[in-house]
Every structure is written in C-alpha cells, then in structure tokens.
C-alpha cells in the first residue's frame, strides 16, 4: 500500500503551529488579573455587607430584649471600693431582669466601652418600669 505525501506529513511531521509557543500577551494577562481583582473585591464587599447586616441584626435583637421596658428617671450611684458593674447591676436591676442585660444597659447609659470603673466614679443607673 502506498501512502500519499500529505498523509505521511500529517502523521509524522507536526504542524508548524504546534511547535511554536503561544505568544505572551500582556493585555490578555492584565485583563485576567483585572477581572480576578474585580471578582475578589466584589466578594469582599459582599462579605463585609453580610457581616455588617448580621452584627446589626444581633444588636437589634439584643436591644429589643433589653428594652422591653421603658426607661424612667435617672438615678445615680457613686462607685465604692470593690464595686463592679456586676455587683451594681445586681443591687439595682429589676427582679425579673437578667443581670447581663442590666450590665449592658448600665454600660450604654454611661458610655463605657469596657467594664472598668473607678472608685468615686458617678454612674447613672438605667431605670425600668416594673
């Protein structure tokens, strides 16, 4: 059986195109990087929005459970040696209220970002209707 030159050539000699490396295109590379960065930014923005909505939702739920009773008049207490937010809350909270909720209300009322108080400090007590 006799083979034609074109058949022989296609089997035994790879095409010229296959022997050469594809040319590097800075534009294609840059556009892929840009697209990847856009996707990453979009994902980060969505993640931040999701976290913000979650935190806002949790704080609304917490405020709703702490704010079931309307706030009344302002009373004050002077911090004595050995007092803590917990002990002040236990002494002044309504009987049915969770102490943790009153501690948070006490911190909010006095704009305390942490639980540290000083002897002699005057704290306003949140008052709730019974």
Image: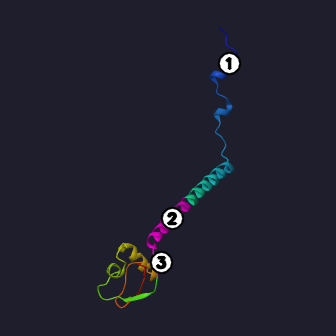
Quadrant, the N terminus? top right
Foreground of the two, 92 or 120: 92
Residue at 56% across, 62% down = 49
* In this view, the mark in front (2 or 3): 3
Query: Is any atom of residue 4 visible in this view?
Result: yes
Contact? badges 1 and 2 (CB < 8 Å): no
Residue at 48% across, 68% down = 59
**In which quadrant of the rendered view does residue 43 lie?**
bottom right
Q: In the picture provided, is 74 more to the left or to the right than 32?
A: left
Residue matched to label 3:
70
**In which quadrant of the rendered view does residue 17 lie?**
top right
Q: Residues within 10 Å of mark 1 (few under 14, many from 20)?
A: few
Report the Cα–Cα distance between label 1 and label 3: 93 Å
Magenta segment, prevailing SS (helix, strand or loop): helix
* In this view, the mark in front (1 or 3): 3
Helix, strand or loop at label 2? It is helix
Q: In the picture provided, is 8 more to the left or to the right than 48?
A: right
Spot occupied by residue 23 in the image (x, y as percentages of width and height): 67, 43
In the rendered image, the vertical position of residue 54 relative to residue 127, given as above or below: above
- Residue 7 is tagged as 1
Q: In the picture provided, is 112 more to the left or to the right than 5?
A: left
Residue at 70% across, 19% down = 6
Helix, strand or loop at label 1? It is helix
Residue found at the very far left of the displayed protein? 82
Residue at 45% across, 81% down = 109
Residue matched to label 2:
57
Q: Earlier in the sequence, mark 1 or mark 2?
A: 1
In the rendered image, the vertical position of residue 81 relative to residue 95, given as above or below: below
Q: Earlier in the sequence, mark 2 or mark 3?
A: 2
Magenta highlight range: 47-71
């Amino acid at each position: 059986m006799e083979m034609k030159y074109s058949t022989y050539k296609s089997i035994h000699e790879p095409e010229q195109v296959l022997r050469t490396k594809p040319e590097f295109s800075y534009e294609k590379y840059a556009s892929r990087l840009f697209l990847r960065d856009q996707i990453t930014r979009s994902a980060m923005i969505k993640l931040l929005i999701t976290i913000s909505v979650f935190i806002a939702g949790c704080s609304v739920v917490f405020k709703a459970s702490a704010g079931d009773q309307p706030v009344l008049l302002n009373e004050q207490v002077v911090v004595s040696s050995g007092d803590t937010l917990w002990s002040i809350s236990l002494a002044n909270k309504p009987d049915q209220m969770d102490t943790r909720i009153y501690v948070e209300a006490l911190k909010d009322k006095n704009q305390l970002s942490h639980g540290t108080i000083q002897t002699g400090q005057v704290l306003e007590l949140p008052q709730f209707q019974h």
